[in-house]
Amino acid sequence: MSDHLFYQSRQTRPFIDRAEGIYLWDVDGQRYLDGSSGAMVSNIGHSHPHVLSCMAEQMQKATFAYRLHFQSDIVERFAKRLAQKAPAGLDKVFFVSGGSEAVETAIKLARQATIARGEPDRFKIISRTPSYHGSTLGAVAVTGTPPFADPFAPMMREMPKVRAPLHYLDGLDMDDPTTGAHYVQQMEEKILAEGPESVLAVLVEPIGGASTGALVPPAGYMEGLRALCDKYGLLLIYDEVMTGGGRTGTYFAADHFGATPDMIISAKGLGGGYVPLGAVISRNDLVEDVLDHGGFLHGFTNAAMPLAAAAGMGVLDVVEDEQLCARASRIGGMVYNRLRDLQSQYPFIGDVRGKGLLLAFELMADATTKQVLPKELNAHAKLVNIAYDNGLIIYSRRTRNGAEGDHFMVCPPLISSAAQVDELMGLLEKSLAQFADLYLKEVA
């Protein structure tokens, strides 16, 4: 650990020197393939010249202008383009600096909108377990991963949770509409148990992020949630912090489903790692109701910075000009098939899942019973470190409510080529073989 800097633990990593495309180099010249786009952030890769040019141009004009003092043409134009990317009816944008801030914004906007509409008793936001929605106390309250929430429980009002649609663990067919209906029924039972008159919104990732390891919902599930929210007068909020920006093969994962939310939360790929950037995209009527009722009691100092908007515009240019949504589908299909090949080679890979270039594989002691590897093995950390030593960066989480189980996100930048997929998978296979040899001889 540095003499003065601290972060999440005492783990140390090399100092970064530079980054370009899908690669990063440390100060000793070691090259790393960014197989997870950082934390699923660097969707267009590193140091893209177009984005750097957009930022440099804006730097010559104004980097910061406080929203209460000035409007900004670049911010206005970026908001318009982002609204045009969102599903029809979502056309109001509130910019923030990242995912946690965006989740807080959506929660508070939803609450103020229902107060403005004369329903002050609605305050509960039902989310899922496992889930992850951010690090602030408001975001932790809707996060369904106990290790992240438990230490802070006395300091907040935890929101109700319902089990995520973990069909692969339950032995259910994700393509069978009755599977989706099964999990929708669980959500309805939770709404009824909490009292529909007290429930404000349902908050979900349309395709799972790190907490569920790229979980794709079963057929009809998202549409069923939309119908439930309409039935009980609730808002449906999509957390697309990880899925947005083209990663799943469409700009927003909402586009995969016949279920338009009332709000979308976006970050990570929105700024692509070039600047801290996030946004909430909302239905116009919700915003107008809040503004008519005295205004939105919320804000951040760095919201709607001209420099951030310029970077975001540049990132969006690249996504569109290089057709990265289509590329994510095509390259993602290659990665998925290669992961399935590894699954057939290594019996401890119990599941492969995801969409586009939001992909994950899960290690298990027994793929049939879904039994986890021994918790004490810390496989999620060991495989990541082996891969890192081999020059490959992947991202891991504990699969079962953050307490045990091991899954790994394989989410390279959307600009990745077929040759780079070969390189990535070669490094991953090498790392899996070393992991099996060192730790899983009995399992393998």
Image (cartoon, rainbow, N blue to C red):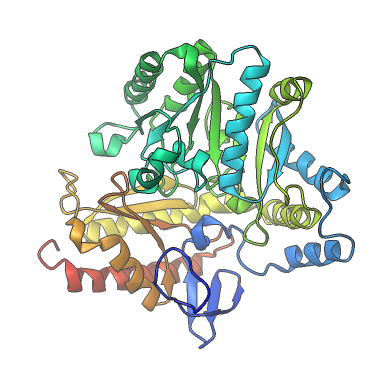
The residue lying at 78 percent from left, 56 percent from top is 310
In the rendered image, the residue lying farthest to the left is 442
Which of these two is toward me, 20 or 346?
Answer: 20
Residue 423: where, in percent of width, then height?
A: 44, 72
Residue 16 at what x, y percent from top left? 55, 78
Looking at the image, residue 129 sits to the left or right of residue 281; the answer is: left
**Side (left or right) of 86 relative to 362:** right
Q: Is residue 412 visible?
A: no
The x and y percentages for residue 81 are 76, 42
Q: Residue furthest front?
A: 154
In terms of image quadrants, where is residue 295?
Answer: top right
Between residue 24 and residue 331, name the one nearer to us: 24
Q: Residue at x 34, y 43 (%)?
A: 146
From the viewer's perspective, tell me whether residue 416 is left or right of residue 383: right
Placement of 116 over or under 211, stated as above or below: above
Question: Looking at the image, is 146 positioned above or below residue 386?
Answer: above
Towards the viewer: 135 or 279: 135
Residue for point 54% across, 52% down: 328
- In the rendered structure, the answer to whether residue 60 lies left or right of residue 235 reads right
Please state, as top left, top right, bottom left or bottom right, where the N terminus lies in the image.
Answer: bottom left
Total labels: the figure holds: 0
The C terminus: image quadrant: bottom left
Percent across and percent down for residue 157 are 45, 32
Which residue shows up at 65% across the image and 22% down it?
A: 113
Res 120 seen here: yes
